[in-house]
Amino acid sequence: MSSDKTYAVQRSDGEWREQLTPAEFNVLRRAGTEAPFRGEYTDTRTRGVYSCRACGAELFRSDTKFDSHCGWPSFYAPLAGDRVEYIEDSSMGMRRVEVRCASCGSHLGHVFEGEGYGTPTDQRYCINSISLRLAADDE
């Protein structure tokens, strides 16, 4: 993964490989994609905060998660606009917008607009479960 940006959390590929499983490394650091309908958080309804699995930065709240039936967890907004960064992505022969963690530059997924979901933002942040870690709210 290459970027001109300097991130608050910086590690070498070797350090990331020590911290992450091979599957996590592939998605988070190589912009891979996990298989649809297999991720840990695809159908989760637990209330809490979703953080970057690589660096722990808080990214999404469960109250912005919705059922999109696309095979990956979907959110209509990040916790705050500065928590994620957006990268133009035309790697699959179409225009997409990649979503990365703004703290460490790890790949999270993509954001799509205008799909007709009844969400306040008309956006779908399609995020790999393997890119996230959920901390449940205290009951």
Image (spheres, grey):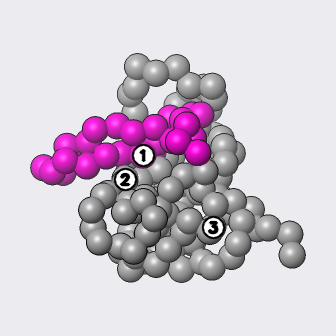
Where is residue 33 shown, x and y percent of the image?
A: 38, 57
Q: Quadrant of the C terminus?
A: bottom right
- Against 86, residue 68 (above or below) is below
- Against 105, residue 73 (above or below) is below
Query: Is 98 included in the stretch rendered in magenta?
Result: yes
Where is residue 15 shown, x and y percent of the image?
A: 62, 32
SS state under label 1: strand
Of the pair 83 and 121, the residue shown nearer to us: 121
Query: Is 97 included in the stretch rendered in magenta?
Result: yes
Residue at horizontal 38 percent and vertical 60 percent from the top = 123
Q: Quadrant of the N terminus?
A: top left
Where is residue 29 shown, x and y percent of the image?
A: 47, 41
Q: Amino acid at mark 3?
A: Ser
- Neighbour class for label 1 at 10 Å: few (<14), some, many (≥20)? many
Residue at horizontal 46 percent and vertical 37 percent from the top = 85
Magenta range = 80-107
Direction from residue 112 to residue 84 in the image, left or right: right
Q: Amino acid at mark 2?
A: His
Whichever of callouts 1 and 3 sits on the residue coming sooner in the sequence is 3
Where is residue 69 shown, x and y percent of the image?
A: 38, 80
Residue at horizontal 42 percent and vertical 46 percent from the top = 99
Label 3 belongs to which residue? Answer: 62
Label 1 belongs to which residue? Answer: 99
Q: Amino acid at mark 1?
A: Val
Label 2 belongs to which residue? Answer: 110
Q: How far is disc 2 from disc 1 in space, using C-alphas?
A: 5 Å
Residue at horizontal 56 percent and vertical 25 percent from the top = 7
Name the outermost residue toward the front. 120
- Neighbour class for label 2 at 10 Å: few (<14), some, many (≥20)? many
Q: Are marks 2 and 1 in contact (CB under 8 Å)?
A: yes
Name the outermost residue toward the right. 139
Name the outermost residue toward the left. 93
